[in-house]
Amino acid sequence: MDEQTINCLAAIQSLLPSLRGVEQKIAQHVLNHSQDVLKLPIAKLAMQTGTAESSIIRFCRKLGYSGFSAFKIGLAQSLSQNSKYSLDDLTIPLAPMDAWQVLQQVFAQTSLVLEQTRQILSREAFLQAAQQFLQAQSITFFGIGTSAPIAQDAYYRFLRLGIPVCCAVDPYEMLLAANNLHTGCVAVGISHTGCSKETIRALKKAQEKGACTVCITSYMDSPVTRFADIPLITSATESKAVREAIASRMAHISLLDSLYTYLALQKSPHIEDTFCQINDMMQKARQ
């Protein structure tokens, strides 16, 4: 990815769980003191974080920047982009918050996450996934917990394209479904944290059976990416107060909707007949 297109803060948040030692210390300091870091020379930042200048350079390069100066430019751009959405993190206030204020903040956070995802998502990975979906003999979606409804929504949506689709959200069902896959099939594991053991096991089994594996997760280098031929990484920005995947779910859904729309457009005009048949069938079912 070109360093000019990196959303610095989104990249740090996405990498944070996989960072260790001095890298995690630097990352946490940048997230907590972003505005101050912009004014610091590298020597001062090294002193404040208790790390070496060489460690800071390695951290910058891990994010995709050529050096500390490029990193600070990226950080400034990221802060500017975030401020466009007037995002104040959802915190537990001293006085009760008005419900309309909460709505404004949730919508702002969702807009921010979608924009960050558009910036950090690998174009190459998305194009590879789109091609695999287009050629797939079957597509199977895996998800558990809060990712289960996203997998089920994708299953329902892709069914309308007239291609073999499966969805597994039960731990045992996931393994059985993965075991039935083969070369030419696509397995999609959805996990916000990338640490859901059931989804990881399912993708691992699907990979062993020869299927193309795709993961949709909010964290780079999370465990699920180790068993994904094509990792699709979305923004990890979430409210610290709620401590639940809210905005990131919308990024996962939008990513799957984009793949669905691509397939629908590629299969046109043949898909038009399928849509008409499905709409007629559903209308009769309601009568």
Image (tube, rainbow, N blue to C red):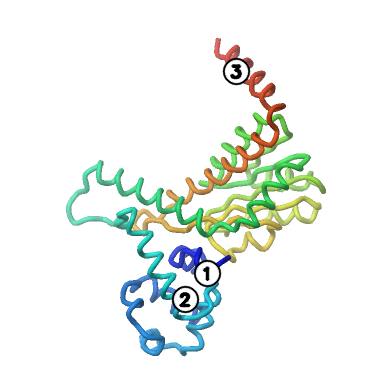
Tell me the quarter of the picture where residue 58 sits. Answer: bottom right
Viewer-side label of 1, 3: 1
How many residues crowd around disc 1 within 10 Å: few (fewer than 14), some, or many (20 or more)?
some
User: Around disc 2, counting alpha carbons within 10 Å, would you say few (fewer than 14), some (14 to 19), or many (20 or more)?
Assistant: some
Q: Is residue 80 left or right of residue 180?
A: left
Tell me which residue sits at (57%, 53%) in the image. Answer: 191
Q: What residue did someone put label 1 on?
A: 3
Secondary element under disc 2, as helix, strand or loop, is helix
Mark 2 residue type:
Ala
Mark 1 and mark 2 lie on one chain; the one further toward the N terminus is: 1
| Residue 13 in picture, x, y percent from top left | 46, 65
In the rendered view, does 268 fall on the left or right side of 83?
Answer: right
- Rendering coords of residue 215 (x, y %): 63, 53
91 relative to 129 in the view: left or right: left
Q: Are marks 1 and 2 in contact (CB under 8 Å)?
A: yes
Amino acid type assigned to the residue bearing label 1 in the image: Glu
Task: Say the numbered circle drawn on residue 282.
Answer: 3
Residue 52 against residue 67 in the figure, above or below: below
Q: Which residue is mark 2?
A: 70
Q: Secondary structure at mark 3?
A: helix
